[in-house]
């Protein structure tokens, strides 16, 4: 599993996320619909209530004397929501503020995305809720996320 996929799966556990229906193929009985959370990569679906995570940079910030490396990955989480009227826009900011607080709480509780065995999550930092774009009756909101993790050198 990749780091971005781990973060996407982690974001789907936020209770405030509006769930989407996604068609899932089953090999024995054909296709069926299953309700799951969806956080896409780089861009949201066309319609409202779409979510995406876009990488915006990464770097190695430290290497210790044992060869363990600490990395920081920067992401932008996008939420595309209905924004036709004032009530919609207020609800959208409430959603984003709730996600912001939830991410801060997860960091304080040391509850991080599940990573492959050689990695260890260390920090989850969230910042800057903004309206990124407003088109027709939909708004694209964003929040920045910094995820810090360590890769331990194989012994």
Image (cartoon, rainbow, N blue to C red):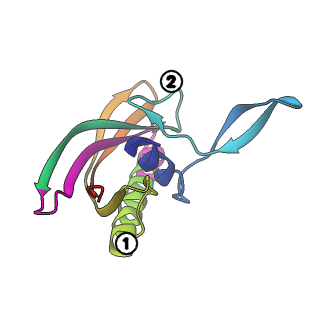
Q: Quadrant of the C terminus?
A: bottom left
Image coordinates of residue 124 in percent, x first then y, are 30, 60
Name the one closer to the observer, 24 or 118: 118
- Left or right of 31: which side holds 8? left
Closer to the camera, 85 or 108? 108
Visible in this render: residue 82?
no
- Position of 17 compared to 145: left or right? right
> Which label number is shown at residue 110?
1
Q: Is residue 73 magenta?
A: yes
What is the quadrant of residue 62 in the picture?
bottom left
Measuring 12% from the left and 56% from the top, which residue is drawn there? 63
Estimate the x, y position of residue 86 in percent, counting from the top left: 42, 45
Give the SS element for disc 2: loop
| Percent x, y of residue 51 | 47, 39
**Label 1 element class:** loop
Residue at which label 2 appears: 46
The part of the image, by quadrant, that contains residue 110 is bottom left
Q: Which residues are magenta?
A: 63-91
Compared to 139, does 126 lie above or below? below
Distance between the alpha carbons at the discs numbered 1 and 2: 34 Å
Side (left or right) of 24 relative to 144: right
């Amino acid at each position: 599993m990749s780091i971005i996929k781990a973060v996407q799966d982690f974001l789907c556990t936020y209770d405030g996320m509006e769930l989407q229906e996604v068609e899932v193929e089953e090999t024995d009985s054909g296709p069926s619909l299953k309700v799951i959370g969806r956080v896409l990569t780089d861009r949201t679906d066309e319609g409202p209530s779409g979510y995406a995570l876009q990488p915006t940079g990464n770097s190695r910030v430290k290497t210790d004397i044992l060869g363990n490396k600490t990395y920081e990955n920067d992401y932008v989480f996008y939420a595309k929501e209905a924004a036709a009227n004032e009530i919609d826009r207020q609800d959208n900011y409430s959603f984003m503020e709730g996600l912001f607080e939830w991410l801060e709480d997860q960091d304080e509780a040391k509850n991080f995305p599940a990573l492959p065995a050689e990695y260890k999550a260390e920090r989850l930092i969230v910042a800057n809720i903004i309206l990124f774009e407003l088109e027709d009756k939909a708004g694209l909101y964003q929040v920045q996320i910094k995820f810090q993790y360590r890769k331990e050198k194989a012994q």
